[in-house]
Amino acid sequence: MHGDTLHTIGDLARLTGLTVKTIRFYSDRGIVPPTGRNPAGHRLYGPDAVARLDLVRTLRELGLDLPTIRRIADRELALPEVAAAHAAALAVQIRDLRLRRAILTAVAERGSDPEEMELMHKLATLSGAERRRLAGDFLDATLADPALSGIARSLTPELPDDPEPAQVAAWVELAELTQDPAFRDTLRNLADHHRADHHRASQHPTDHHRADQHPTDQHPADQHPTDQHPADQQRAGRTPAAAPRRDAAALARDHAAPALTAGVDPASPQADAVVAALATQYASGLGRPDDTALRHRLLTRLETANDPRRQRYLHLLAIVNGWPPPEDLTPALDWAIQALRAHT
């Protein structure tokens, strides 16, 4: 301390290294109040003013606001509690800054052309809440039906606080993909097909579905709007539908993959039996016969599901979320589509 000496603002400026203007600013806001004035009317400050100003400067450098600093200086708040809360807030900011740096690095490495730069800049400067909202807005726009909430959750990217470079690069590409109007249309169509097939199946239940044909049997690669676990349906206030237990893409994979492995030409007579089995199972789930209209309906479902952007989204989603790589359904869907065209 400095004894019982009273200090002018000029004295405090020399003792603390702060400017006269800064000290006067703190004084005007009651953070460092004067103890009186000299005969000339100048403010005078007590010996504790130096320590108080040192504390104010330290807390300001840590980013605390002036009202909080005043309460700490007046002993209305306990400094350890404020420091702990501020440290936690800083930790969040540091994580966010690290992530932004990683995203900027990924954007720089992409070598985006001028047309992409506006979107890349937007992605690089998003806050954590904005990043989550970006994915949420995309899924809300394409899977708006509350009955599809479980599917939407399975398609939600969750970038870790401390991601690997590959996860950041995947998130940047995935975020860009969510802004593609054509891909949004594809996902909406898949959702519409899902609703239409499940509505048809619920109106025509059959005993075709066995207990072992449970929605959770579906491979992660099939996680597009085509199936939903009964628990998710119940949370959405719906009675779980009895059918179909396997969506069109999963059925096509089941039937086409063995034929593809065996080298069966999709246009050959041998493929006719595979197509018949696939169409029959799909028709049975909808409670209708296998006819030309049914096969055209199935073909439309498979062509929509075979959009390469859908497979890319699932691949990127797995990287971002740290999941195992999804199975690529493209070869099986290609075979099934060609076979249906040849045998319809």
Image: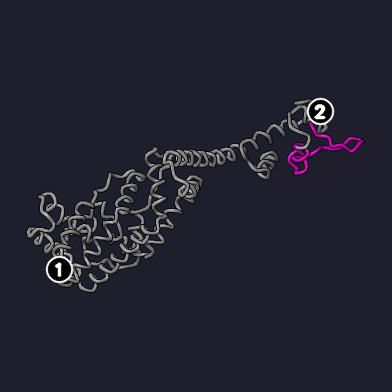
Where residue 219 appears, as percent x and y from the top left, is 23, 52
Question: Which one is earlier in the sequence, the residue at label 2 or at label 1?
Answer: 2
- Identify which amino acid the numbered label 1 is placed on: Asp
Magenta span contains residue 328: no
Instruction: Determine contact: label 2, label 1, CB under 8 Å.
Output: no
Outermost residue toward the bottom in this view: 203
**Residue drawn at 39 percent across, 64 percent down:** 144
Secondary structure of residue under mark 1: loop
Secondary structure of residue under mark 2: loop
Location of residue 321 with respect to 342 vertically, above or below = above
Location of residue 186 with respect to 6 vertically, above or below = below
Outermost residue toward the left in this view: 270
Please, which colouring scheme is shown? Answer: one colour
Residue under pointer 1? 207
2 vs 1, front mark: 1
Outermost residue toward the right in this view: 39
* Cα distance between the residues tagged 2 and 1: 95 Å
Boundaries of the magenta span: 22-46
Residue under pointer 2? 4
Residue 141: quadrant of the picture: bottom left
- The answer to whether 116 appears left or right of 265 in the picture is right
User: Tag 1: Cα neighbours inside 10 Å, few (<14), some, or many (≥20)?
Assistant: few
| Quadrant of the snapshot with the C terminus | bottom left
- The answer to whether 336 appears left or right of 144 in the picture is left
Where residue 8 appears, as percent x and y from the top left, is 83, 32
